[in-house]
Image: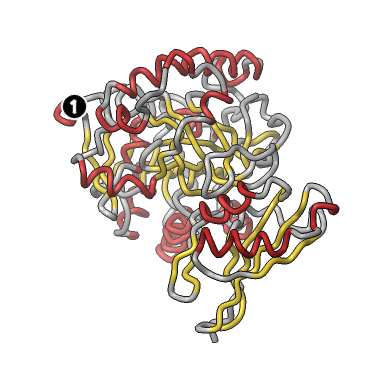
Amino acid sequence: MSDPTDPLDPLETRDPQQREEALMRALPALVARAQAAPGWARILRDIDAAAVTGRAALARLPVTRKSDLHALQQAEPPFGGLTTTPARRLRHLFMSPGPIFDPEGSAQDWWRFARPMRAIGLRAGHVVQNCFSYHFTPAAFMAEGGAASLGCPVIPAGIGQTEMQVQAMAALKPDAYVGTPSFLKIIIEKAQEMGADIRSLQRALVGAEALPPSLRAWLQDNGVRRVLQMYGSADIGNIAYETESDGAVNPGMVMDEDLILEIVRPGTGDPVPEGEVGEVVVTSFNPDYPLIRFGTGDLSAVLPGRSPCGRTNVRIRGWMGRADQTTKVRGMFVHPSQVAEVVRRHPEIAKARLVVSGEMANDVMTLHCELASPSSEAGMEAALVDTMRDVTKLRGEVRFVGKGELPNDGKVIEDARSYK
């Protein structure tokens, strides 16, 4: 098998400070390019692109979240005015459930899938069985672009037709599978039932759903020696991917080279300290579809240190859940942004978590607070109750907890009600 630690290009192993400086130097031109699109011109109005030269300046720009896209695209079809290339000059126009529309430009490996494919050991001449869907959505085309960039022929298998999937593998001898891990398990079980030889399949790049350790182990025990997962989205493409060293999967996922990562407190645009769980916010240097502080709605955290594989980019802990924790309390929605506003009005609070308990129709809303200084507690409870009522229009209680007692899981609102 080819060495998975061999990088795609020198960008993957450059000094982290060089990478950071290069990304920050490119920021003003990216913001200026985005402002040429009508949607971004509105979102970034009054922003001086030339002044966006570092992370502090970037953090002052608004977050545009994936959950905003449907309304933006309805107001200005088909892409919300966020593309800098006209729709009729794009390669593909995709439609995901929602509906949400996504573009694809004509550049090679537009979705930047070559890096995770390289990380599973794919090289020119390796055959890939692509089992992502080719129907309306972009995942299959992401894999196509990465494979073409590496010089790998593709079997465009798509999803379903399990018996034909096995027949194709037995006849065409693919070196790798790309698709969801659960479907790969189904294919292997069908091959075993049919007595088909699919031993050529030694690698798998999986995504679009969770890969529990038990499933990874099952796939490896059943012939797929190298199983790595990647994390991406229909808007951005590849965001981060797993790597391997000496036959072992390395901790975390390595970020793609053409993205700026921020982890922000859910409901806000405020970056959190390294290691704290928050929402993944990405700035993408895509010339056709620039995304400035795009909130994915996914939770993750930065994993300190460097990967043993030799790639030097930032690592994240992978997908850790959803950031949108909007919860209905006594018939009214409470949003993470409202919890953030309560905290903003009381700088004595170091961290907070709104816990909704009780039974349905008998909701109890309690703000659990860690204070920067225990001495701040005196007299704060009544003021916090008033602020909660002012911001959420609901009465809530307050509970003070010790520093470090609130879990580091990215939750701003916890629904702990009994639904029996």
> Where does residue 9 sit, x and y in percent of width and height?
53, 17
Front-most of residues 365 and 181: 365
Q: Is residue 137 left or right of residue 275?
A: left
> Where does residue 131 sit, x and y in percent of width and height?
36, 48
x 76%, y 62%: residue? 400
x 67%, y 24%: residue? 310
Instruction: Give the labeled residue for mark 1.
Output: 86
The reply to whether residue 147 is visible in this rendering is: no
- Identify the image quadrant of residue 62: top left
Query: What is the basis of the colouring in this image?
Result: secondary structure
Query: In the rendered view, would you say 311 is above or below 325?
Result: above
Front-most of residues 329 and 196: 329
> Where does residue 360 sit, x and y in percent of width and height?
52, 82
**Position of the C terminus by quadrant:** bottom right
Three-letter amino acid code of the residue under disc 1: Pro
The residue sitting at the bottom extreme is: 420
